[in-house]
Amino acid sequence: MVFQNFPIVPETPGPQRGPKPSSVSCDTIKNARKAVSKLLQKHSLADTLMEIQRENLAAQKAQNQSHINLELHKQIIDEVKMGLWTIEQAQEKIEAIENDGSPRPAKHQKKVVQEFSPEEISSGSEDQ
């Protein structure tokens, strides 16, 4: 078999075609770009630390409020034992604490006035 030397001819490029026209409208592409840009916004380290700080402060505040509510419950129970409040008034106060986080002034509170006997009054004046 005999090989003949053929001259090497570079291929000449034919007319180049542009990109195919998109079937998606320009408005749709713009809307998609807007949505992507919103999603790609990243938090900086400072933003992340601030968010952690906010969460920690909220948790601490909730814990402090729970502790305050517990102390108020104990105080109300002690006041009922001393006779300063009726059980119904104490229940109203406790419900108010649980709902609002702060005791509301009761409209129909029983005022307890300590009464002294005449002997206690006369003995109290002698001590002065």
Image (cartoon, rainbow, N blue to C red):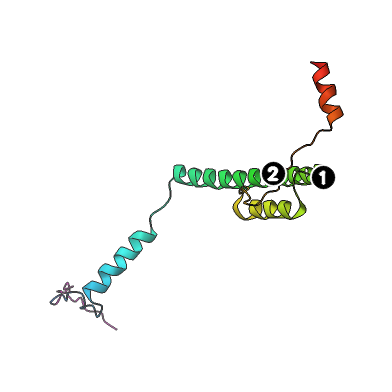
10 is within the stretch colored magenta: yes
Magenta-colored span: 1-14
Q: Is residue 34 left or right of residue 109?
A: left
Camera-side residue of 90 and 4: 90
Q: Is residue 100 left or right of residue 20?
A: right
Furthest toward the bottom, the residue is: 1
The quadrant holding residue 3 is bottom left
The quadrant holding residue 28 is bottom left
Q: Residue at 77% across / 53% down in the picture?
A: 87
The amino acid type of the residue labelled 2 equals His
- Judging by the rendered image, the residue that carries numbered circle 2 is 67
Q: Residues within 10 Å of mark 2 (few under 14, many from 20)?
A: few
Q: Residue at 76% across / 51% down in the picture?
A: 86
As displayed, is residue 45 above or below residue 36? Answer: above
As displayed, is residue 89 above or below residue 30? Answer: above
Camera-side residue of 28 and 57: 57
Element at label 2: helix
Instruction: Report the magenta stretch's main SS.
Output: loop
State the count of labels.
2
Q: Residue at 79% across / 36% down in the picture?
A: 115
The amino acid type of the residue labelled 1 equals Lys
Residue 19 in the image: x percent, y percent? 20, 74
In primary-sequence order, the first of circles 1 and 2 is 2
- Judging by the rendered image, the residue that carries numbered circle 1 is 81
Q: Residue at 69% across / 44% down in the picture?
A: 67
